[in-house]
């Protein structure tokens, strides 16, 4: 978890997340994925530079709650593609 609080909260202290990921890596070779507060492609990009995986939940649920089925499917596709593109190496 990248922050303490409720799901859907904004990720603000990326330096603290990086510190925690480095600490976790001292104890395990298991890939480290970060979730909580990932709401934008910029968030995903920043976390992908730090961790092995990016977990997005509340941002997807918010999109689902906002529209009709066709619009939701299109928005989810667009949003997840933007997250993926943001996490790929340049």
Image: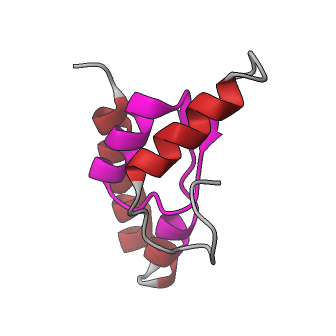
At x 65%, y 32%, the residue is 23
Q: Quadrant of the N terminus?
A: bottom right
Judging from the image, the colouring scheme is: secondary structure
Which quarter of the picture shows residue 24?
A: top right
Residue most toward the left? 90
Picture coordinates of residue 30 (x, y %)?
75, 21
Picture coordinates of residue 89 (x, y %)?
30, 19
Picture coordinates of residue 29 (x, y %)?
74, 15
Q: Is residue 80 visible?
A: no
In the figure, is residue 32 to the left or right of 40? right
In the rendered view, tell whether residue 20 sits above or below residue 38: above
As rendered, which of 51 and 68 lies closer to the eye?
A: 51
At x 58%, y 29%, the residue is 22
Residue most toward the top? 29
Highlighted range, magenta: 32-61
Picture coordinates of residue 61 (x, y %)?
55, 72
Q: Is residue 59 visible?
A: yes
As rendered, which of 41 and 66 lies closer to the eye?
A: 41
At x 48%, y 50%, the residue is 16
In the rendered view, tell whether residue 17 sits above or below residue 22: below
């Amino acid at each position: 978890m990248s922050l303490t609080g409720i799901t859907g909260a904004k990720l603000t202290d990326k330096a603290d997340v990086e510190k925690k990921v480095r600490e976790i890596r001292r104890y395990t070779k298991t890939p480290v994925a970060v979730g909580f507060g990932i709401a934008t492609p910029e968030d995903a990009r920043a976390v992908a530079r730090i961790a092995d995986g990016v977990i997005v939940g509340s941002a997807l649920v918010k999109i689902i709650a906002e529209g009709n089925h066709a619009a939701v499917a299109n928005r989810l596709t667009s949003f997840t593609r933007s997250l993926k593109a943001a996490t790929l190496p340049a």
